Amino acid sequence: MERWYRFIIHRPRFVLLLILLLTGFFAFHARHIQIDSSLDSLLPDNDPERQYYNDVVRLFGSENVAVIGILADNIYTPPTLQKIQRLTDELRKIPEVKNVFSLANAPDIIAKITGAEQELLIPTIPATVAEAAVIKEKVATQPIYHKNLVAADGRAAAINIFFLESITDNEFVRRGIDEKIQAIIDQAQGPEKIYYTGLPHFKAVSARAIVEDLSYLLPLALGLILIVLFFCLRSVRGVMLP
């Protein structure tokens, strides 16, 4: 150990250069660090609960579904139904979105059973209140959509967003998919209240919160270390050398 001390004392420039090179090497590769905010990463691979969760996902499909909720006094009005149609179309334009499911493109189950030519629940967006009332009566005959795409009292509707299976959590954050969806929602706000939720949104918000915390926690930790070193060593040189 004493030889190392002597080497550091007699070769200070070499030691500093070596430290700078190592710092630069690790700083260069630090750009590849990824923040994983997924919940399943908290469980070991051999955990029974995680294995059960993976089995459920394989059986029923991915849980990465985002939901947009639209609240209004009555969604069965031409402006609100037009807004649902417009949101559905805009969300489908996002490249990472696989499918969007809402009242605007929901199939007419009864029509399919009876063999009718019209397959959509709402073939055309109504232009009048009377036409919207007809749509309300039609939806009432297909309760499978109640509490799924529309509330039974007609005061809320949902838009379900399904993403490509190839999109990982990190890519979801890196590509700014969450921000794209939020921007579309912000433009459509009012007079209806529009909310955005779902596991992908939760993961994206968590990842941003982690980055925000690190942006001030790391400098704070470094400052505390420097203060402790100064009080222990009582010199600026003793603080800067470590």
Image (cartoon, rainbow, N blue to C red):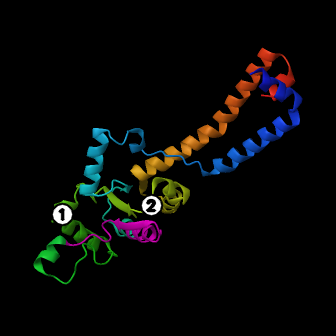
- Decide which of tag 2 and tag 1 comes sooner along the chain: 1
Residue 2 numbered mark, or none:
none
In-front residue for pair 230/25: 25
- Residue 222 coordinates in the image, percent (x, y): 71, 30
- Residue at label 2? 167
> Which residue reaches farthest front?
3
Left or right relative to 154: residue 214? right
Q: Which range is magenta? A: 83-108
Eye-nearest disc, 2 or 1: 2
Q: Nearer the viewer, residue 118 or 31?
A: 31
Task: Kindly identify the residue that appears in the image at 27 percent across and 56 percent down.
Answer: 58
Residue situated furthest left in the rendering = 114
The residue shown at (46%, 53%) is 169
Q: CA distance from mark 2 to mark 1?
A: 36 Å
Residue labelled with disc 1: 140
- Magenta segment includes 164: no
Residue 114 versus residue 19 in the image, above or below: below
What residue sits 34% from the left and 55% below the top? 73
Of the 4 image quadrants, the one containing the C terminus is: top right
**Amino acid identity at mark 1:** Ala
Does the rendering let one see residue 198?
Answer: no
Please provide percent x and percent y for residue 230: 80, 20
Amino acid residing under circle 2: Ile
Quadrant where the N terminus sits is top right
Q: Quadrant of residue 22?
A: top right
In this image, 63 relative to 14: left or right?
left
